[in-house]
Image (cartoon, rainbow, N blue to C red):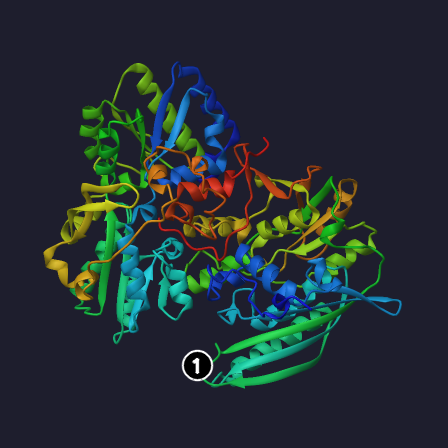
Amino acid sequence: MSSPLEFAPSCPFPIQNYPQVLMAHGGGGKLMHQLIGKMFAPAFRNPLSESQHDSSVFQVGSQRLAFTTDSFVVRPLFFPGGDLGSLAVHGTVNDLAMSGARPLYLSAAFIIEEGLAMDTLWRIVSSMKQAAEKAGVQIITGDTKVVDKGKGDSLFINTAGIGILEHSLRIDPQSVQPGDAIVVNGDMGRHGMAIMAVREGLEFESAIESDSAPLAAEVLALIKAGIPIHCLRDLTRGGLTSVLNEIAESANLTIQVEEKSIPVREDVRAACEILGLDPFQVACEGRFAAFVPEAQASAALAVMRRQSGGESACQIGRVTDQKQPKVLIKSSIGANRIMDMATGEQLPRIC
Amino acid sequence: MKYLDEYRDARGARAYAAEIGRVTTRPWTLMEICGGQTHAIVKYGIDELLPKELTLIHGPGCPVCVTPLETIERAIELAARPGIILCSFGDMLRVPGNHTDLLSVKAGGGDVRIIYSPLDAFKIAEQNPSREVVFFGVGFETTAPATAMAVFQAEQKNLHNFSLLVSHVLVPPAMEAILGSPHCRVQGFLAAGHVCTVMGYEEYLPIARRYRAPIVVTGFEPLDILQGVLMCVAQLEQGRAEVENQYSRSVRREGNLPAQQLIQKVFQVVPRKWRGVGEIPRSGLGLREAYAAFDAERRFGLTGMEVSEPADCMSGSVLQGKIKPRECPAFGTRCTPEHPLGATMVSSEGACAAYYRYRREPVLT
């Protein structure tokens, strides 16, 4: 007889601490990782879901394909440098690109709140169309739902995407090796601060524009140049800090980065200083980190810098041979500290 | 970044550290009073640059951490009431009350809003005339003028749906409480630069004299702190106990007089309980009788709150500089930012949060 426990549908999440879902459970920090690790992953466990990557890679016949999905709920709908529509395309295209896939097709599902201005919806849809064309993908299926006034927040979009792998590299966190160089394709934190500045009414000499952009061309150029990429990850929620911690954890290795070598634009740094935020924990939507063998780092950087948007690509650190999953950052005055993942949302400080 | 990178320069830091090493001949114990300085020290590894004779103790410099549990419970109760919008700084939202925190109240349907300035709460009150808007005002002298301005404007504009749950605290009485304790190890202070930007530093002169302790008004960047330490150690070595101003690019002796006048107009000095420390006489700001109509505790009849601190939380000892965060047995095990026992683990200025974030295990250098 089976143990009765197997039939008890008890919630695996420590509900004594969190009887309700908090915003922090979607913030890209530790609470979100706990939610995924303790509830979603065990419930849906299968070999494909365990790669802990931005998309799942699987074989159909002789062909490897990548599949992913993402939902977009950003407010405001329009912000400097982008909007909900372009973001919904870039997000899914980028998740596919991070597995080394060439994105092919997307789906688009719209959850629309009653009363949304038709003109607003059209602007978002037009923006999706343009973003898809630019990224070289087609939106081939979709869904439309309208919910009662007050039951949604104007518009949510979900996109799913499928892409094709045209190489034999295994690009995932488990492929990271001691000695790998870590390179990024540009400055940190611009998307998050663009949104925050609009939301909080912060005014600077010129608006901070989101970095939202499709990354597939950059990744495919790296592959075409023969760079033996070990891992790729776009620096979205939780920013660089979350990504480095996730990869250190998956690879069971210590990562060392240098604060001074991580590019952050002047206006973004200033906004972060004012709000008490860490730019390395702020989301980007057009930035990624690549883990490549140290000997290939300069070749990879040369390729990245030739791509539009990748002009300020640089190396920010390396993977050490220490078998402890942590991230160390050398401060500007030369001392090392832990680069820790945020708990949940970054909250502005008091003074 | 201009006016910032200059104060985070590695060569400058090493030069200051070498000079501190040169002037230090004996063991000295200094306390930094501001949580912002504590975080900078731990984040940049400033203490690791200092000679082993010097000990830095972290003081009760986090206003969120010292806000009494009763007041947090009152905020939680107000936030859960329908018809009330509770506004606070982001830092307050994760601070644990007896059973819950403001973020959880928000998740349960309470209208809790993060604001950046007390004047934002005032604006929210103007925009929502049918709702009661309560601003949960905490902080040292630094944030008191903005809180006072919100109340002052509410009174000027007859804004009847705005009120204040106030827990502002004052730094000099806390320093006196520490120096007056029979167990006091602190020999010199780094005073909080931003507090002094508002208040000036004349009120520190009698403290330095009475307790023979040098006080250096200090900024928040690595080079500020190192220079503050150097000035403080130099005084100790020379047998001086004066008030000096390292942060002269922001602080004037008399402070910001219009800001002080505004504080004076709206607030009076009251006794205040500090979480983890106890009641300190004349250490808080409460609303003057003329502004009592804006006192949320009176308006909503909040009294007699039963509270109990978690038995295994040692944040009081941390706040008083008696232990370092890692010496607490619950640190990093039963107490983490996700499951905090005390406010010092969640506030962005809390000492435990700084150690957890940057130092929870020895790092390689």
Give the chain of mark 1: A
**Which residue is pictured at 23% across the width and 37% down the height?**
B172
**Which residue is pictured at 52% across the width and 62% down the height?**
A25
**Which residue is pictured at 24% across the width and 42% down the height?**
B278
The spot of residue A201 in percent (x, y) is: 40, 62
Left or right, residue A229 beside residue B6:
right
Left or right, residue B159 beside residue A256:
left
Quarter assignment of residue A287? bottom right
Quarter assignment of residue B75? bottom left
Residue under pointer 1:
A150
Q: Is residue A317 above or below residue A123?
A: above
Dot 1: few (<14), some (14–19), or many (≥20) neighbours within 10 Å?
A: few
Q: Is residue B84 above or below residue A151?
A: above
Q: Is residue A321 above or below residue A85?
A: above
Q: Is residue B105 visible?
A: yes
Quarter of the rendering occupied by the C terminus of chain B = top right
Q: Is residue B70 above or below residue B129?
A: above
Quarter assignment of residue B253? top left
Q: Is residue B295 visible?
A: no
The one nearer the camera, A343 or A123, is A343
The spot of residue B50 in percent (x, y) is: 46, 24
Going by the numbered disc 1, the residue's amino acid type is: Gly
Callout 1: helix, strand or loop? loop
Left or right, residue B130 beside residue A289:
left
The spot of residue A153 in percent (x, y) is: 48, 76
